[in-house]
Amino acid sequence: MDHPHFYHENLNYAEVLELKGSYDIDVLIHASATATNFISLSSEMRKASYRELEKTIFLANRCEAELITFHLGWNPGFITSKGFIFKPEWYSEHNYRVIKEEMGKFLKEIESRDNSMMLCLENTIGMDERTEKAIEEIIHETDLRLTFDIGHWNVKPGHDIFLKHFDRVENIHLHDNKGDYDTHMALGRGNIDLGIIPFKEYRGFVTLELRDEKAIVESKKHLEEYLKNLK
């Protein structure tokens, strides 16, 4: 929801409902990735991020959306005379604490409501052992659902926890890359391995997360051919 036309403050839920009914489609919402950072060093930024997600949940319920995908956030690196420097260990304990305490609490509060929305955490940033542990714990303690992005898995460390808990995955983001950058190429143009996804057992949503119509059509054909030949 980072596009100005689709930001929750600018979006008319009635128009979304009209499109949903006219085209018989399911509505999936992706929360803003730029207006939220749940692992920010700033407590005020984290509080604002949860308020932002609350507003997205409100819109999603009015739009009769199936789920909301959201990002964890990010930790900053630094530009120095020796280039860009980022050390995950600087943030390791901080990330564990705010995910375990703050996100865990938020998810439990959302689940206690009658109109709770399915919230799906997406694998985005590289994750160290402490971040993985925090996510593992809130998976066991809450009903947190997951969005598995195979392109991110191909370029970032620490994402196998999403495969470990694939029973929690409700949405899959498909796109390709060559293992170095998150380029969102058409399927078949890079080196991702679709075989890591248990398509035979999966009953959730699949999103072709491409940047142009040609790549979407090309990826759709590639996926259909792959699934047809799946043994």
Image (cartoon, helix red, strand yellow):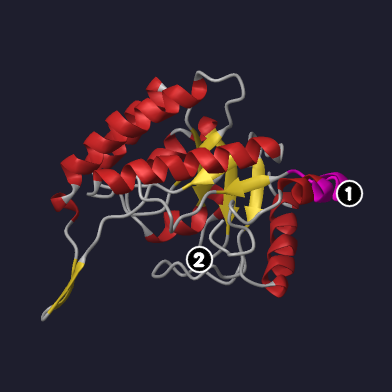
Using the image as rendered, state which of residue 212 and residue 231 is in the foreground.
Answer: 212
Against 70, is 101 above or below? Answer: above
| SS at circle 2 | loop
Using the image as rendered, state which of residue 165 and residue 67 is in the foreground.
Answer: 67
Please state if 64 lies on the left or on the right of 141 as rendered: right
Mark 1 residue type = Ser
Against 44, is 220 above or below? Answer: below
Q: Is residue 121 visible?
A: no
Residue 132 counted in the magenta span: no
Which quadrant of the figure contains the N terminus? bottom right
Q: Which mark is residue 230?
A: none
Please state if 204 lies on the left or on the right of 30 as rendered: right
| Chief SS of the magenta region | helix
Residue ID at (31%, 32%): 102
**Crowding at mark 2 (Cα within 10 Å: few <14, some 14-19, many 20+):** few
The magenta segment: 18-26
Q: Write down the residue under mark 1.
A: 22
Work out whether mark 1 precedes mark 2 in sequence or the reverse, and give the earlier one: 1
Residue ID at (35%, 45%): 38
Q: Position of residue 76 (x, y in %)?
A: 24, 61
